Image: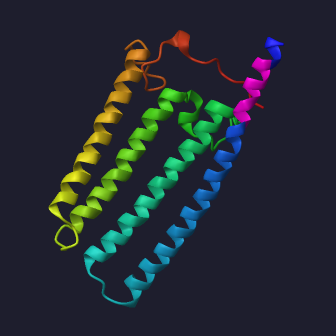
Amino acid sequence: MPGRVGYVMFLSRWIQAPLYLGLIVAQIVYVWRFMMELIHLIELGFGGHPPETTVMLIVLGLVDVVMISNLLIMVIIGGYETFVSRLRIEGHPDQPQWLSHVNANVLKVKLAMAIIGISSIHLLQIFINAARPAVTDRELIWKTLIHLTFVVSALALALIDRIMAGGRPNHGTGRGERPADRQPQRAAA
């Protein structure tokens, strides 16, 4: 009986699969949003003389969409591989390099870095708009503090990951992982 309970618990990881499929749908929405903004930029760029700041804000919006999309890919692929099931893509020429050594800690640090990048884009957009009356000093201060909180959190996650890995960097993976802790190479499917 205890073996069956454990097996059911192990199977429960598949409950997360619809969540990752839902994130793929969110990815499609972001591609659609990107295309609409790109069309808007093309219409503005070739149909008139928009101010440079307007073009810059649209381009930053496009970069923001791409960075959020990259974040979604990391969560979809890394999360599925870490918590649900192996993807069995070893040896595939398009396999992301980071996927070969992904675990929950690596995924957290990568996600934190992506969030810092997204926050940086938002902060840059606010600074470009700072001269407009709609942007208050209070908003600038709070968004800067939130961004700095993201930076400190990412540094703390990286430090915790390094401490948990024994503090010795491994030059092969770029993280502080002891050779004995590494997962064995997976056989190609």
Q: Relative to the observer, which residue lies in front, 186 or 131? A: 131
Q: Main secondary structure of the magenta part?
A: helix
Figure colour scheme: rainbow
Q: Quadrant of residue 116?
A: top left
Q: Is residue 137 above or below residue 23?
A: below
Residue 95 pos. (x, y %): 62, 40
Q: Is residue 96 above or below residue 26?
A: above
Q: Quadrant of the C terminus?
A: top right
Q: Relative to the observer, which residue lies in front, 8 or 172? A: 8
Residue 49 pos. (x, y %): 30, 87
Q: Relative to the observer, which residue lies in front, 107 or 187? A: 107
* Magenta stretch holds residue 121: no
On screen, residue 31 versus residue 113, left or right, reads right
- Which residue sits at x=56%, y=17%? 182
Q: Relative to the observer, which residue lies in front, 157 or 97? A: 157
Residue 37 pos. (x, y %): 46, 73
Residue stretch rendered in magenta on the structure: 5-14
